[in-house]
Amino acid sequence: MKHSLDDTIAAIATPVGVGGVGMIRISGRRAKEALLSVFRGGESGGIESHRMMHGWIVNNTGEKVDEVLACFMGSPKSFTGEDVAEIYCHGSQVVLRSVLGLIMKHDIRLAENGEFAKRAFLSGKLDLTQAESILDLVKAKTEVGAGYAIRQLEGRLKQKIDNIKEELTGLLVEIEVGMDFPDDGQEKKCTEIHKKIRLEVNKMDKLLEKAEVRRVFRDGISVVITGKPNVGKSSLLNAILGEERVIVTDVPGTTRDTIEEGVSIRGLAVKIIDTAGIRETGGAVERAGVERARKEIKMADMVIMVFDGAAGLSAEDFEIINEVGDKLNIAVINKIDLANIIKIDEINGRIKVGGVALVSAIRNEGIGYLLNIIHEMAIHELKGQADYEIAINARHEGCLQRAKIKLEKAMAGACNEIPNELITIDIKEAISELGEITGETISEEIVNKIFSDFCIGK
């Protein structure tokens, strides 16, 4: 159902669950009226903009429902740019729903997903990249991921896109002036046009390099632990997690299914997946576990191959090496507290290895070094760099790619001495694609889709 922006909306803006404080947000022209209808308090009994007030929420009969803090923020100095009221209740869901119900009796409707942020975008308080960063910040799994979201909320991506657009617009003006006054020698030369467009395409290429870093630091990477039975895969998982997550025994084939756990490694979200030991023998249940392990290896971003340093390499180890193939991997030689008869050259000579770690999972030796290897490989091999200022998402990447295609067409046209009138069409279309990133030229359908991914209170 399509609602009017003239509606006043309200929603619980804190997550479901029991907490010390829960917040209800109201936005729209009737926000102050709605607050006055349920709130009793304030030093003078009135409501002053941008001032926190202590008081009570009361129902229709004047009965007290909760002791609260409340704040009214008059337009345009609010998150949405509209009149906004926020009520800070005790965190019980029963209380929050009761207060929200009282508010909605006064011709206030429930906000849709992301509608507060959408109104902030439509009122010009946020550009689209900043609005998207709010969702990234809410979903951030690590400090680094949150840091990227904060930098985008500051408007750093918008600044870079605006800079490219400004340069292209300036070039467009120069070309069009030259077209209007050719007798004055102002016709823009093809080599000059090509050079200026190339500078902006190079800037866009640098932004495109950052597409993978967002995925890595927001969503994290998946790392599968594999190896033959009884090499210490589950012990290694426990050592990485720093807790006894998996039961460890001397009986081969104890792990029959995959076990997944999340861990943060120097700001990188990592999903560690322990798998069944890969071997051809075993019962039906174990064979099913081995098949699942093989599937996980294919889907993983990275694989940790575990070898028994005290036993040496076997035919089963070489079969696992073949299974992993060219997948990004780390070789872990385990049980070095017992012995180590595996030479690193044996590993390096047979497989494409990103690193080798000598560990004793049972004694927690060498685990820190292994974690460093995981982090460094994720950063360099998966093309993420923690010192990047920003990280773009798939939507931004698509817009940049389309803009780049238009500009490359314009450059080719300039080299082939295509009339400047046609070149300007491609430049204008590229500018339009870039405007879609910040929301200046985006369709209503795409805007609605973006904000539908938000939770109701945002």
Image: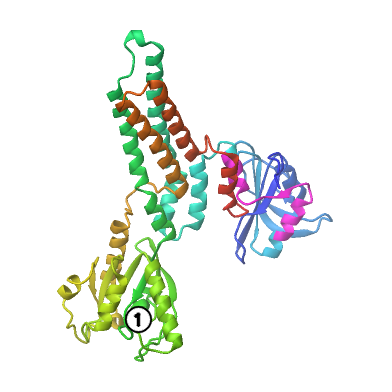
Q: What residue sits 55% from the left and 48% below the top? A: 450
Horizontal side of residue 176 vs 325, given as left or right: right
Please name the predominant secondary structure of the magenta segment in the image. helix
Q: Amino acid at mark 1?
A: Ile
User: Badge 1 local density, few (<14 within 10 Å), some, or many (20+)?
Assistant: many
Q: Can residue 77 be seen in the rendering of this structure? A: no
Q: Can residue 315 be seen in the rendering of this structure? A: yes
Horizontal side of residue 439 vs 254, given as left or right: right
Residue 318 highlighted magenta (yes or no): no
Q: What residue sits 41% from the left and 26% below the top? A: 169
Asked which quadrant contains residue 177, the reply is: top left
Q: Position of residue 344 (x, y in %)?
A: 17, 74
Q: What residue sits 46% from the left and 86% below the top? A: 285
Question: Which colour scheme appears in the figure?
Answer: rainbow
Q: Is residue 208 above or below residue 67?
A: above
Q: Position of residue 44 (x, y in %)?
A: 71, 44
- Residue closest to the eye, 158 or 437: 437
- The stretch in magenta equals 97-121
Residue 98 highlighted magenta (yes or no): yes
- Residue closest to the eye, 271 or 255: 255
Q: Position of residue 201 (x, y in %)?
A: 34, 36
Horizontal side of residue 382 vs 425, given as left or right: left
* Residue with the mark numbered 1: 278
